[in-house]
Image (cartoon, rainbow, N blue to C red):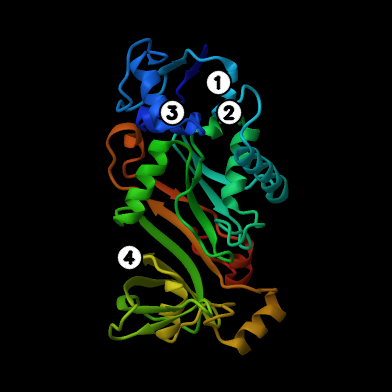
Amino acid sequence: MRQVTITSGEAGQRFDKYLRKYLKEAPDSFLYKMLRKKNITLNSGKASGGERLQAGDVVCLYLSEETLAGFGAGASMPADKDRHLTEESWAAYRKFGKLQVVYEDEHILAVNKPAGILSQKAALHDLSLNEWLIGYLLATKKITEESLRTFHPSVCNRLDRNTSGIVICGKSLCGSQEMSRVFRDRSLHKYYLLYVEGHMCQGQTIEGYLYKDRRSNRVEILPVARPGCAKIVTSYRPVHTGQEETLVEVELITGKTHQIRAHLASEGFPLTGDPKYGNPLLNEKRKREYGITHQLLHAYRVVFPRFTGALEALSGREIRAPLPAVFRRLGGSLPAEYG
């Protein structure tokens, strides 16, 4: 007999879905037969499989170790796929080190991603923030290798490789589901700080249509829709003017590929250091003077909507990530709120 206690990371899912993950090689017919015969129980009672699991629930599997191992629930080592994920996660944690965690609770984690790190894999061999997250949680004993059988913590939003700032990660199933929901319905407010070339005198909310060329990984901003376009809305305001540039706060109303970079460039305000949509001559000057090699774009603040249930304590909370040092080098003495 094997006894398993449901963790907060696994809570919220249907019991039968959990069993399919735990006994990866077992057919559904076997799982439901074992439930009917009470060879698999939930909190010492008979279960149908449709129950929603809660943290602390106890699952008992009255099966031999040979049967469990045969269906992919090995007693000591994770399955090959999970073992590979674990190895990659430790490698990412060693490579990227102790990144700055700006908020963490039982369900979510917010990390200040440096420029140069992928949020998620772009190719099979990549190491990304997604793998770092699991490595961090293993290293700090927030999860175990065994728990990875039934739930993989993961990032809930993505930033471009060379965009820095807040990435929200789901530590539990409930956290992942709720964060995915508020990113999707746009009830979570996301704010960015960035430098643009030139002096911006006033802010506004602008709209347009974004068309992505997948072959070149570039986007084009159009005034009217055409097939394949997505409508975009960007709100921005200047917060500090330097000698040749302006520090700008942007609220991303919609969230499309390269939206901020391309939309502001289309308004005559290319981002400082942007290799795709920026000014090549000014970029070269910034590289010589300040060592800037990528767009100065930082996801510095998020404000959560109202939640009920497990994430209620997050309601209305604001999280901020400090600016990278290069922002201060370029801008000099910034307002205290941003510096």
Q: Which mark is residue 253?
A: 4
Secondary structure state at the residue bearing disc 2: helix
Residue at 40% in and 31% down: 28
C-alpha gap between disc 2 and disc 3: 14 Å
Mark 3 or 4 closer to N-term? 3
**Front disc: 1 or 3:** 1
Q: Quadrant of the C terminus?
A: bottom right
| Residues packed near mark 1 inside 10 Å, few (<14), some (14 to 19) or many (20 plus) | few
Nearer to us in this view, 282 or 263: 263
**Front disc: 1 or 2:** 1
Image height check: is 134 above or below 205?
above
Q: Which mark is residue 146?
A: 2
Mark 2 or 4 closer to N-term? 2
Image height check: is 45 above or below 279?
above
Mark 1 or 2 closer to N-term? 1
Residue identified by numbered label 3: 19
Mark 2 or 3 closer to N-term? 3
